[in-house]
Image (spheres, rainbow, N blue to C red):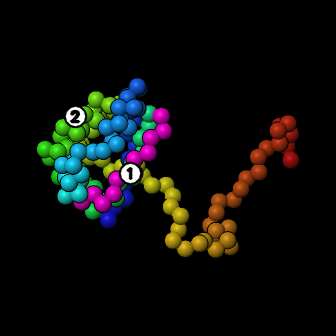
């Protein structure tokens, strides 16, 4: 399974339309997403910014499956009217790179201190040397 994070952006003034349209997606799109290997897809919106987390079997295969799917093509056309940069599923997209994840097991404080970069004290505010 893959977990992919995505960021898309709405065109200004399209927030209410986007929320309304996503209240219930078409049943045929729901079926197509599941057939494409999507296990879960969550979207958060902050202003114009959309943050997606997609759990799927294979993200590249999912995009290839949906690229010309008769349920996805009109959906993407509709989304294209709302998004700042439309996605027609034709290009490569690997999502947002992950920077950090909470480890499955707690990190021992001593091990963390040994691997952490040294903290360099800031220069005094008055510009004098120490």
Q: Quadrant of residue 15?
A: top left
Residue at the top extreme of this rendering = 13
- Residue 15 within the segment the image draws in magenta: no
Q: Position of residue 110 (x, y in %)?
A: 68, 73
- Tell me where residue 75 appears, x and y as whole percent: 22, 39
The residue under the point 27% across, 33% down is 80
Q: Secondary structure at mark 2?
A: helix
Which of 12 and 91 lies nearest the eye of the viewer?
12
- Assess disc 2: are there few (<14), some (14-19) or many (≥20) residues with their C-alpha within 10 Å of its C-alpha: few
Range covered by the magenta-colored residues: 36-47
Image disc number at residue 99: none
Q: Position of residue 121 (x, y in %)?
A: 77, 51
Q: Which residue is mark 2?
A: 77
Instruction: Specify the label residue 42 is tagged with.
Output: 1
Q: Is residue 24 left or right of residue 28?
A: right
- Image quarter hosting the N terminus: bottom left
Answer whether residue 114 is visible to the viewer in this image. Answer: no
The numbered mark, 1 or 2, whose residue comes first in the sequence reads 1
Judging depth in this view, the residue of 18 and 113 nearest the camera is 18
Image quadrant assignment for residue 73: top left
- Name above or below for residue 123 compared with residue 54: above
Residue at image position (28%, 29%) is 81
> Going 71% across and 56% down the picture, which residue do you hit?
119
Gap in Å between the C-alphas at discs 1 and 2?
20 Å
**Taken as a whole, is the magenta stretch helix, strand or loop?**
strand
């Amino acid at each position: 399974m893959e977990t992919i994070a995505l960021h898309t952006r709405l065109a200004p003034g399209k927030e209410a339309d986007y929320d309304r349209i996503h209240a219930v997606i078409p049943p045929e799109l729901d079926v197509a997403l599941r057939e494409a290997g999507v296990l879960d897809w969550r979207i958060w919106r902050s202003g114009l910014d959309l943050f997606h987390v997609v759990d799927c079997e294979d993200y590249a295969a999912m995009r290839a499956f949906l690229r010309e799917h008769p349920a996805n093509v009109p959906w993407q056309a509709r989304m294209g009217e709302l998004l700042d940069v439309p996605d027609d599923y034709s290009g490569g997209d690997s999502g947002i790179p992950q920077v950090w994840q909470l480890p499955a097991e707690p990190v021992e404080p001593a091990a963390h201190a040994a691997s952490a970069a040294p903290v360099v004290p800031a220069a005094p505010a008055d510009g004098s040397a120490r």
